[in-house]
Amino acid sequence: MSRIEKRFAALKDKNQAAFVSFTMAGDPNYDTSLDLMKALPKAGVDIIELGMPFTDPMADGPAIQLAGQRAIKGGQTLKKTLDMVTAFRKTDDETPIVLMGYYNPIFIHGVEDFIANAKAAGVDGLIVVDLPPEEDDELCVPARAAGLDFIRLATPTTDEKRLPKVLENTSGFVYYVSITGITGAATPDEDAVGKAVAAIKEKTDLPVAVGFGVSTPEQAAEIAKVADGVVVGSAIVRSMADALTVAGPPKKSFQKDVVSAVKKLANATKRARK
C-alpha cells in the first residue's frame, strides 16, 4: 500500500476524515517553509499538499497567488521544492506528500526527470490542475507507472457522462472541488457537497477529499461528516501572510501562529464524527 492508502485506511478504522493542508513551497522563504512543513504532522495534518510555485496559477485565488509570488521572489524553484521533500523525509517517512500545481514547471524540468526525482525525494502523489484526462499519456500514465498517485479533480460541473473519464486513471484519492471558481473564492454548500461525494462514491472505491472553499473549523467539521478528507489551503496561506512583518520577513511568532490555525482546523475535522 502507498502512504496515501495507508493513511486513509488508518483513519477509516478510527472513523475519522483526513485533514489535508496546503502550503506553498518556499513561502515566505525556503527555511521557514521547511520548518513549518516539519511541524504540520504534529499539528494534526494527515496529508501534506505542497504547492509548486508558478507565475500563472489560473485555478488559484489571491491568497495562493500571492504565496506563489512570495516564494518565487524568494528564489524557490521546482528543484528546491523537491529538495524540501527530501529534507522532510529525513525525519518523517510516514506522512504522505502530494505536490500540487501546474504542468509548465514540470515540462520545463523534463517529465522523465521530474518523475524520477519526485519518486526519489519521497513524493507520494501529484495534482496537476491543467492536465485533463485527455492528456494522461503526458504525465499521468508514466507517473502512475513509477508508483506516484495521480489525483484528479472533480467539480460541480463534472456530470455523469464526464465523471468516468475523470476517474479512469485517478489513484490515491479523488479531490472534489466544492465550489465553481478559484480557490478561496466562496464557501461550500454542505448539502450539495454531500450529494456530490455520494455520487462519486457510487463510481469509485477511492476516498473523496473536498477542498477549494473550506476555510473555517466549522466548515471543516461539516465537510468531514460527508467526505473522507477535508482540504484547506487559502485559510492556512492567509494565516501565513498575517504572520509576516510589513517588510516581508516572518514574525518571531510565525510558526506558532500558523500551527495554531492549522490545529483548530485539524481538530474540528477529527472531532466531526464523534
Image (cartoon, rainbow, N blue to C red):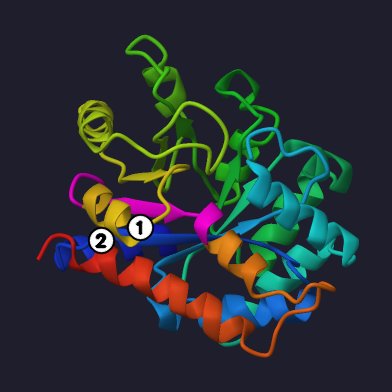
Q: Are marks 1 and 2 in contact (CB under 8 Å)?
A: yes
* Residue 95 seen anywhere in this rendered image of the structure: yes
Q: Residue at x 39, y 35 (%)?
A: 178
The x, y position of residue 211, in whole percent, is: 43, 45
For image coordinates 85% across by 74% down, the residue present is 247
Amino acid found under the numbered disc labelled 2: Ala
Question: What is the three-letter code of the residue carrying label 1?
Answer: Glu
Please report the bounds of the magenta region as a residue range. 225-235
Answer above or below: position of 211 versus 32: above
The stretch drawn in magenta includes residue 232 = yes
Q: Secondary structure at mark 2?
A: helix
What is the number of the mark on residue 5?
A: 1
**27 sits to left or right of 228:** right
Numbered label attached to residue 9: 2
- What residue is at 30 percent from the left and 51 percent from the top? 219
Q: Quadrant of the C terminus?
A: bottom left
Q: Quadrant of residue 22?
A: bottom right
Q: Is residue 140 left or right of residue 110?
A: left
Q: State the quadrant of the N terminus.
A: bottom left
